[in-house]
Amino acid sequence: MKKMMFTLITGLMAIILAACGGNEESKEAKNGEKAKTAETAQQKEQQKQMEEMQKKLEAQQVDEKKIVAIVNDKEILGSDYNSALAYTQSQMQQMGQDPTSKEAADQVKNQTINSLVGQTLLLQDVDKKGYKVSEADINKQLDEVKKQFKTEKEFEAALKKSGMDMKTLKTQIADDIKIKQYVEQEVPAGEITNEEIQKTYDQYAEQGKSTGQEVPKLEEVKPQIEQSLQQQKQQEKLAQHVEVLKKNAKIDIKI
C-alpha cells in the first residue's frame, strides 16, 4: 500500500510541476538532486576505500603453489595459507584492527601459519587414532552450509569465488567433523563450577554498573555465561594440547 501511495504521489507531483512552468525547477527538486549527488559521491568514496583495502589484503597472500611449511613430511601450500589468511584478516577487522598495517603484518603471518600448523597436527593425530566420518554426516553438514544461500546457483557462485570445488569443500567438512569428535574425546573441557560462573557474572555486573547499564539477574544469563566459559576453557586446553603435539613433531616453516 505504501509503495502504491508513493507512486501515485510521484505521478501527481510530475503533472503539477509540468503545469507550473515547464523547465523551471523547484527548490525541493534542487535540494533532492544535491542530496542524491552527495550520496552518490559518498558511495563512490566508500567503494574506492573498499577496493583499496581489498588490494592491501590480497598483497599479503603468497603464491598458491609455494610450500609455506612442512609438518611431519606434510606439505602446506600457499593455497591453504591464503584461505587461512583471509580468516585471520577477517577476525582482526571484526575487532576493529587493520590487518594490513605495518605493525600487524608479522602478527597476521604468525597467527595464520600457527593456525595451519596446529590444524595439520590435529588432523594427523585424528587419522592416527582412527576417527572416521560417514558420507551421511558430511552431506548433512553440507546441507546446512547450503541453507545459508537463497539458491543453489548462489551457493555455487560463492564456492567458485572461494577457489574451492565440491570435493575440497566436502574434505574440509569431513575434517571439521572429525576434529570436533576428536576434541570432545581427547581434550574435554571439563565441568564449569558455580564459583566460576558467579565470578564471571560479578565482573560483568561491575562493568555494567560502571557504564550505567541495567544488569540482568544471574539466572537470566547463567546459560550464556556457562557456555562462554566452556568454550574459553576448551580453547585453552586445545592450545595446550597442540603445544604438546608440536614438541613431538618435525616442523619446518618456509615463510
Image (cartoon, rainbow, N blue to C red):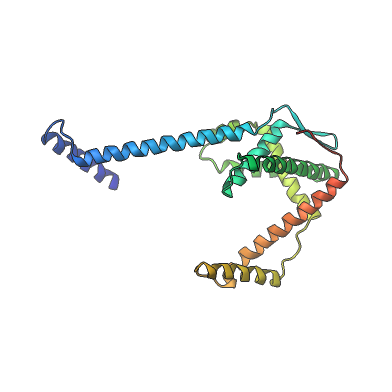
Name the residue at 70% across, 61% down: 230
- Using the image as rendered, state which of residue 235 and residue 108 is in the foreground: 108
Residue 137 appears in the figure: yes
Q: Residue at x 73, y 57 (%)?
A: 234
- Vertically, is 193 above or below 99? below
Write down the quadrant of residue 141 in the picture: top right
Which of the pair 188/22 is nearer the observer? Answer: 22
Q: Is residue 40 left or right of residue 77?
A: left
Residue 109, image x, y percentages: 70, 39
Q: Is residue 115 above or below residue 239?
A: above
Q: Residue at x 79, y 53 (%)?
A: 240
Front in this rendered view, residue 140 or 94: 94
> At x 58% / y 70%, what residue is drawn?
206
Residue 142 appearing in the image: no
The picture places residue 161, in percent across and down from the top left corner, at 58, 31
> Which residue appears farthest toward the left when viewing the image?
20
Q: In the picture shown, does residue 217 fall above or below 225? A: below
Instruction: Tell me where residue 29 sits by quadrant.
Output: top left
Question: How many numbered markers are drawn?
Answer: 0
Determine the residue located farthest toward the front in the rendered image.
102
Residue 7 placed where, x, y %?
Answer: 25, 41
Residue 212 locus on image (x, y percent): 49, 69
